[in-house]
Amino acid sequence: MVARLDADKTRPMDDSSPIRDFPKYGRPLVYVNGIYGKAVAWSHSYGLIEWLDASGKYHLGWAHSASIKRVTAEEWKGSSGL
């Protein structure tokens, strides 16, 4: 919950469109700039992505929609801890 509040504070200011959340158990698997994660929410121009780093630390951050690629379960190499 705190991570989401922190991520929302860092939302890019050039996008004032509404934020829509993916259902908790229906979040798409994604690949963004070398990171495998899950899409949590989206707006017109950005997606909110969650991932675990190599040490298992949880991260949540915004990425431009052009850099987000949906991947299949077979292609995804993210942590099963999400």
Image: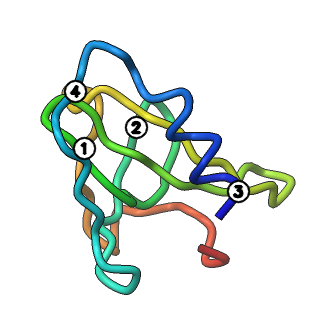
Asked whether disc 1 touches disc 2, contact meaning CB atoms under 8 Å apart, the reply is yes
Mark 4 nearby-residue class (10 Å; few <14, some 14–19, many ≥20): few
Please report the residue visible at 22 percent of the width from the left and 32 percent of the height from the top: 65
**Mark on residue 2?**
3
Figure label count: 4
Question: Circle 4 — which element?
Answer: loop
Earlier-in-chain disc, 3 versus 2: 3
Q: Residues within 10 Å of mark 2 (few under 14, many from 20)?
A: some
Q: 27 above or below 51?
A: below
Q: In the displayed structure, does residue 50 sit left or right of residue 25?
A: right
**Looking at this rendering, what residue extends furthest in the right direction?**
55
Distance in Å between CA atoms under marks 1 and 2? 6 Å
Which amino acid is tagged 3? Val
Q: Is residue 36 left or right of residue 64?
A: right
Q: What residue is rendered at 29% in x and 81% in y?
A: 26
Q: Which residue is tagged 4? A: 16
- Residue 77 locus on image (x, y percent): 51, 61
Per the image, the residue denoted by label 1 is 69
Residue 21 in picture, x, y percent from top left: 29, 63
- Residue 81 shown left or right of residue 55 in the figure: left
Mark number, residue 32: 2
Nearest-to-viewer mark from 4 and 2: 4
Q: The disc labelled 2 sits on which kind of residue? A: Val
Contact check, label 1 and label 3, Cβ < 8 Å: no
Neighbour class for label 3 at 10 Å: few (<14), some, many (≥20)?
Answer: few
Q: Residues under labels 3 and 4: Cα distance?
A: 22 Å
Mark 3: secondary structure: helix
The secondary element bearing badge 2 is classed as strand
Q: Residue at x 45, y 49 (%)?
A: 49
